[in-house]
Amino acid sequence: MSRTKFLLSEDQLPTTWYNVVADLPKPLEPMLHPGTRQPLTPDDLAPLFPAELIAQEFSTERETDIPGAVLDVYRQWRPSPLVRARRLERALDTPARIYFKNEGVSPAGSHKPNTAVPQAYYNKQAGVQRLITETGAGQWGSSLSLACQYFGLVCEVYMVAVSYRQKPYRRGLMETYGATVTASPSEHTEAGRAALAADPDSPGSLGLAISEAVEAAVSSGGTAKYALGSVLNHVLMHQTIIGKEAQLQMELAEDFPDIVIGAAGGGSNFGGLALPFLGEQLRGGRPVRAVAVEPASCPTMTEGRFDYDFGDTAGMTPLTKMHTLGHDFVPPSIHAGGLRYHGMSPIISQLKEFGFLEARAVPQTACFEAGVTFARNEGIVPAPESTHAVRAAIDEALVCKETGEAKTILFSLSGHGHFDMQAYIDYFGGKLTD
Ligand SMILES: *Cc1c(COP(=O)(O)O)cnc(C)c1O
């Protein structure tokens, strides 16, 4: 029998997260304080995050134990399936073996609960009552809403105004999970009021929504903290549960990936899958080709500069050394909202500078074309973000068809697209631009 799904039992769920910082050939450049431009200290982050998450942000330990209460929640949907895309392989007539790690099986429909759950847990442990965040397409906001609900925290989400209006179902999901959702820019914050004064119909942006959420948390007098769904070191570390499972599952499949692929917005699902494999390589193990895929309309790694920049529009966050298009860059409103961010994880940026990974930019319509091919063969409708990984996986498989090489391709299916059907409708209607 030729197997299609490689499943781990619940007792095979990994119990530690992996921190690639322990294996980097050179330390990361320090974050800088936005005011003084001096290296950031853990104390500087205390208004934003609880002590345990700050410790993880600065950690150089290779493995961190996952708390039991977090593992209990993970078990609702983890270990997630590793699937061999046999019908897709046949449709492409490729000798390549294509596997995907399906993170769309989480209750919120993406990989983002992998970090939302521990972030809510550590905040609760620290006595925090409210978590404030921003969301673009709504994937992160719905994941944090759910995680806050599990741990008895109040959740407040600043949702980019244009998404707030265009994605009522995502907003409804957040409200179902118990969160309060505010369109950004809003009258609640100085950053929001300034943006509304300049343009009362402002569509908002992720960078601006981050400014609002940070300002609201900092001015809460300590009862509320802030949470970020990507980019930061602790977020990437939480996401390595994906790659740790995938390593065990590739063993079950008696195979090993030549190429590991993920869509990259801030770098967390790509890093989550690729970093455990790259870590093996950095410690002298078997090498992999890691490919991070971004939209041609927001080409952070392929065209951005590698430099210090702010994470938000108003310049309130620490400065990090990363690939950036500039903190005032407003990307066009492509459908893959989760990939519309001006910056990139410092870890992913640094690994690219070291030459340990490749970045590739792909246009939107080619991604939807790949997403439709995937859906028609594997049944799952990928999130618009995830179609970027599907596109690159299909392209690699087509190269194998040309060369006759039977390579093993592993990609991250970071989420399903059931809340994004308007994007597919627009694609079929010929309304999408690149
Ligand atoms: C948020 C999101 C992304 C992009 O974020 P990363 O931090 O780069 O992973 C990709 N896919 C889905 C489904 C998302 O929700």
Image (tube, helix red, strand yellow):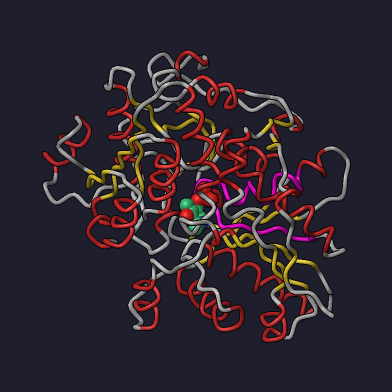
Taking 238 as reference, is 265 above or below it? below
In the image shown, does 181 or 264 lie closer to the viewer?
Answer: 181
What x and y, as percent, mark residue 425? 36, 79
Q: Quadrant of residue 152?
A: top left
Is any part of residue 7 visible from this angle? yes
Name the quarter where the C terminus is drawn. bottom left
Which segment is the magenta one? 257-278
Q: Is residue 117 left or right of residue 242?
A: left
**Residue 103 against residue 319 in the figure, above or below:** below
Q: Residue at x 44, y 48 (%)?
A: 143
- Out of 118 and 393, give the one closest to the viewer: 118
Pick the residue in front: 313 or 168.
168
Image height of 62 relative to 133, above or below: above
- Residue 371 within the segment the image draws in magenta: no
Location of residue 389 by image quarter? bottom right
Where in the figure is residue 158, as x and y percent of width and height? 28, 42
333 w.r.t. 65: above or below = below
| 424 sits left or right of 116 in the view | left
Name the side, left or right, on which 243 lies relative to 75: right
Residue nearest the observer in this picture, 15 or 434: 15
Residue at 79%, 74% (x, y): give it: 3
- Quadrant of the rendered image containing residue 26: top right
What quarter of the picture does the N terminus occupy?
A: bottom right
Name which residue lies at 56% across and 81% down. 373
Residue 130 shown left or right of residue 119 in the figure: left
